[in-house]
Image (cartoon, coloured by chain):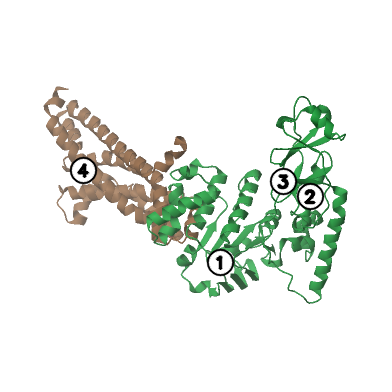
Amino acid sequence: MIRFESVTKEFPDGTVAVDALSLTAPTGKITVLVGPSGCGKTTSLRMINRMIEPTGGRILIDDRDTSTIDAAELRRGIGYVIQHAGLFPHRTILANITTVPLLLGWDKARATSHALELMDRVGLPQSFAKRYPSQLSGGQQQRVGVARALAADPPVMLMDEPFSAVDPIVREQLQDEFLRLQEEIGTTIVFVTHDIDEAIKLGDQVAVLRVGGRLAQLAAPEELLSRPVDDFVADFVGRDRGYRTLGFRTAPFPTSSEPTVRLGASAADARGVTDDPWVLVLDDDDHPVGWVERERLDGTVTRDALHRGGTVASTDGPLRQALDAALSAPSGRGVIVGPDGVFVGTVRARDLIEPIEASAARERAASSADASGDEAGEGAGEGIVVAEPKAL
Amino acid sequence: MDWFTSHLDDVWRLSVIHAYLAGIPLLLGLVVALPLGWLARRFSWAYPPLIIGTGLLYTLPSLAVFILLPGILHTQILDPVNVLVAMTVYTVALLVRTVADGLGAIPDDVRLAANAMGYRPVRRLLGVELPLAVPVISAGLRVAAVSNVSIVSVAAIIGVEQLGSLFTDGFNRDFFAPIVTGIIACGVLSLLFDVVIVVVTRLLTPWTRARAAS
């Protein structure tokens, strides 16, 4: 657990970068600091490992005041990932990853075997071990950066805009893998970003900072979306807040049965199962693979003939996923699978409105209960993972 | 050509002395320039005096230095130590800026990462900064090597034997063969120094060629 106790940083020229910041980053959770540039988020992060010294207040890690710990020792116990990875260009990938373990005095064999294991975990082939950073793409370098930060199994990891320098597709992939990795390792993470969508996707709790280094709101992502405390937070969180909130809500919803054909079936078979212009296609494992247009069918049903626009939602997934599946399906019927990926049925957008309204009503009831003094349900307890809908 | 073949032994002997007088100061100069360059980079107030001061050393006329050094060092005028010290001074003059700039050219995010991982200053210098500065320092060293080979020959005027002696000999006898031989030998020596520096640099910096290999 990392605790900021009214931490202030005033630079010699009188600029106040962080102003009496108090917050707690709970053990094993991801706390995201987000805000516009000049809000002191990076300064706050760097005060944790004393790259910047606070001018007021204290920072405690597991109840130890960091100012009482030797700075170099402290940093060796804290993983650190920066925007451009900051890999050592003169060292191989393996040597980069083993840096901190070797500084800590691990023997080389142990550091190496642990590093190779980490490469595996972050999705780097072991054949990269002897390469140099310049031989890797930006996304691969960032994976090395994460592996290097984790190499000595630090209980705490700091991440400063680690995914913002890679292209959007790679970024999303790295974010998903990062969440999966975090589920395995459960490190206490403080993550800085200027991207509110990234904050909402990754954070167990999100701290929105305003310019001048003051905390505007500290809340779980869903609460940030549904109950921003003021205009600044509301503006910063941005539009589509109501819709984005659905990304955190689950509720049972009705599904209808849907006529289907298998890949490889003949056009005549496909035309026979339904009069609807669109027919859903399953593979041999009953996983949905896409829609075909009845009229255009010719010969047999092949993957080439499939419409690719629709997304798939899971029965236990967030309502946003189900709604997106319905809206994106060419037939207007969203494809729903079970947790195992097996086709369950379809749902129309109009059938989702009622569950959505019901869940919103439950949410309002819960929040008025909070307001009447019961704070127990509030805060950033749950680990929330937003599963993006898979494309068909 | 006749003169060269009949004086092969002499040319070889003078070349070895020349290499010694130009080469040893290269190493000594590097050893002195490394901490000075580091100081200039580490403390911003130290940068101007160190860079300007050591740079000015290079403007000292070499003949005057060769003549004045024995008085300062209490050595004999013909003592090769005078030449070694003078050439070390010139090497330092050329290398301090190179070392400072080489250390300064290290990307901020690399330095930041090293700090964040818990490197202390000395280990960071030896393990991260210096290895990364090798290409820049090596470039400076190549200039200093050629400069040394050239300046050492001036010491022939005060009577310290090396390839420069061929120039004074040829001048005194109005005879071109030793002069041409001396020029060629100096050229070959410079080239050898250059090759050695390039090879050592390549061995120290496999990472600079990694991109091409991928």
| Chain of the residue under label 1 | A
Judged left or right of residue A84, residue B130 is left
| Chain of the residue under label 3 | A
From the viewer's perspective, is residue A179 above or below residue A133? below
Which mark's residue is nearer the viewer, 4 or 2? 2
Q: Secondary structure at mark 2?
A: helix
What number is the disc on residue B20?
A: 4
Sequence-wise, which precedes: disc 2 or disc 1?
1
Q: Secondary structure at mark 1?
A: helix
Mark 2 to mark 1: distance in Å?
40 Å
**Image marks 3 and 1: residues in contact by CB distance under 8 Å:** no
**How dense is the environment of label 4, judged by Cα within 10 Å: few (below 14), some, or many (20 and up)?**
some
| Residue at the image position 57 percent from the left and 71 percent from the top | A59
| Chain of the residue under label 4 | B
Q: Amino acid at mark 3?
A: Val
Can residue B101 be seen in the rendering of this structure?
A: no
Q: Secondary structure at mark 3?
A: loop
Q: Amino acid at mark 2?
A: Ala
Image coords of residue B175 (percent x, y): 17, 27
Mark 4 to mark 1: distance in Å?
54 Å
Which mark's residue is nearer the viewer, 3 or 4? 3
| Residue at the image position 14 percent from the left and 36 percent from the top | B13
| Chain of the residue under label 2 | A
Which mark's residue is nearer the viewer, 4 or 1? 1
Can residue B179 be seen in the rendering of this structure?
A: yes
Chain letter, green in picture: A
What number is the disc on residue A322?
A: 2
**Image marks 3 and 4: residues in contact by CB distance under 8 Å:** no
